[in-house]
Image (tube, rainbow, N blue to C red):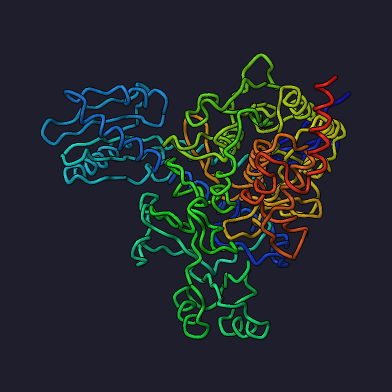
Amino acid sequence: MKWRRWAALGLTGAAAVAAVSLLFPSSDTDKAAPRNSVSRLSVPQPAEEQKLKQSILKRDMTATERLSRLDARGHLRSLAADFAQSPGGKLPDSAQDLQKDHKQFQAILWYDAAAGTRQFRREDFNPDPAVKKQLNTYLNYAKKALNKSSSYESPCFPEKQPKYFVAAEPAKGKKQGVIAVMDIGILGRVQDHQHKNLRLIPYPKEGRFKVESVHADTLKDITVKTGHDNEKASHYYENEIVVTFQSKPSPDQMKQILTEISGKPPRQLNSTYIFRSDTMSMKQLHQYFQKNWQPKYLEPHYLYLTNESGGSIWDDPGSFFNEEENRSSEETPEIPNDMLFSEYQWNLPIIETNRGWQLSKGSNDVIVGIVDTGVDLKHPDLQGRLLKGYNVIEPDKEPFDDVGHGTHVAGIISANVNNGEGIAGMMWGGKILPVKALDKSGSGTTYSVAQGIIWATDHGAKVINMSLGNYADAQFLHEAIRYAFERDVVLIAATGNDNTERPGYPAAYPEVLSVSATDYNLQKASFSNYGDYIDVMAPGESIASTYPDNQYAALSGTSMASPHVAALAALIRSVNPDLKNTEVMDIIRKNVVDLGDTGRDKYYGYGQIDVYAALQAAGGGEAPLQFWPQSIQRKMEHAVERVQ
């Protein structure tokens, strides 16, 4: 038998060669066009495609840089406290460990205005003379900031090919602190990664609606220049507003509202609506609704809302869509202390993950297989979560990730939660079974992918995530899919990123739960594939997650949406281990936020996943009502087996 080569960059060579690649392109920073619109499905010219691709790269690289800065800041704050307690400015063990395990810390300096500076650099840190000149300038700025007991961050430098930035954090109450020279080479890696694996995105930029920021306490306008400015910032859509009416407007009243605000039909859940205007700002919308409609309440359509007292939309962005407006204390969403969660992980609250954790945080009895590029086996945010996996490409080696894609997927599912480090995964419990079926180019053969599925099935996977695919229906792959499905594995796959209706595989196989991507505005991500085979949607734009070498990156694509659903399937199997794979899939499909046309449609499938609703339907320790007969039958069968 001749195996097909699944190339990462499209069809190459003879017609027998099929393209199967990682699925994680992203969209522009502007908001997506109105759902189901013709413009969303139009095919741009090659020049437009290149322009969009550069915009995508810029957006994800900017987000990755901010993640790197925030991660560095957290570590430096801890180091500042350790250095202050270390006698004679000696390099504390925590700093040695940090430099050993986090190669991005090229140099660590302890600055004391009275005693001078002690420097601890990596042996391989030798910047050229031009870079040293810039470095010394920024180091002087950092020292001046520490003299004022202030934090400091430099821009990335050199300007054309950024390699470093300088950051500093003071020790409390003293003219001393820690300065670090940070390697920002991850930007180049993400750029290379996306150059290789991005598919071009056919959609026109809308560009008329932007995001503004307000102080979370005072609600006064503020300017957010870096990721660190987000500490007290809440972001909202400038041309949108959330309105809860005393009673639902009549059709005539709704028509009047849309005419007066120059708006389009709003999204609605119960008596709450999100209105968008072509001409009015959020403040103007607020004045209009307050004056003319006396609603129950008005608020900006927040993108992020940090509120330490809890109960904010950022804590739980679905909160204002619930029928019960005043939740009991038992329903207060759980907010983990992971460093990057509150500022960057919009994707978890928007699918009700925080509330879902009240019902299940996962079980170590549930194994999730990740058939991908492998996983960074040494990443601190994945420690304790990884089982011994398999390298299909080189069976005598460990399934180590030399691309970054599989590590990113793994973090979304199961990065350690509440450890003060990096991000929070969707599962507090549960194990990851890494299977390297794609090589360092991000591609694999029909055989390697199929073999990876079979191996994961034979080694205990209850759920398998496949953030990979192509448009060729490979029979061998389908046989592997059937093999896993018949053994009660829940199979999850990404649909693809070409904004096309053409079915992608393995997502389009009937045994697989297919996942497309939404943006943070609950609209179909511009790049996301669509079609009658789509099952559900999940967040897929600028998703923060783990990345090789103890780092974090923001990537976009249906590859990022798929692991959200895989994690949900694992949580369901943790709540109710008796459910069959078909029952798990049905629960996920039936417990969603309906988007687009009512019911299932080709742009949104059944809708966006709702973790809390799905776990409720799974029934906790008891079988859900819709599966009661099957549950009773299984218990009777188990009883008979024990008697025999």
Q: Nearer the viewer, residue 164 or 603?
A: 603
* Residue 29 placement: quadrant: bottom right
Point out the image quarter for the C terminus: top right
425 left or right, relative to 69: right
Q: Residue at x 72, y 65 (%)?
A: 36
Q: Residue, x 16% and y 23% (percent of image)?
A: 88
Decide: is 42 above or below 260: above
Q: Nearer the viewer, residue 362 or 167?
A: 362
Residue sticking out furthest to the front: 643
Image height of 215 relative to 488, above or below: below
Q: Is residue 562 visible?
A: yes
Look at the picture and state if 214 lies above or below 196.
below
Q: Residue furthest left?
A: 114
Counting from the top left corner in percent of width and height, residue 464 is at: 71, 34
Q: Quadrant of residue 318?
A: bottom right
Horizontal side of 589 relative to 346 (left or right) equals right
216 relative position to 452: left or right: left
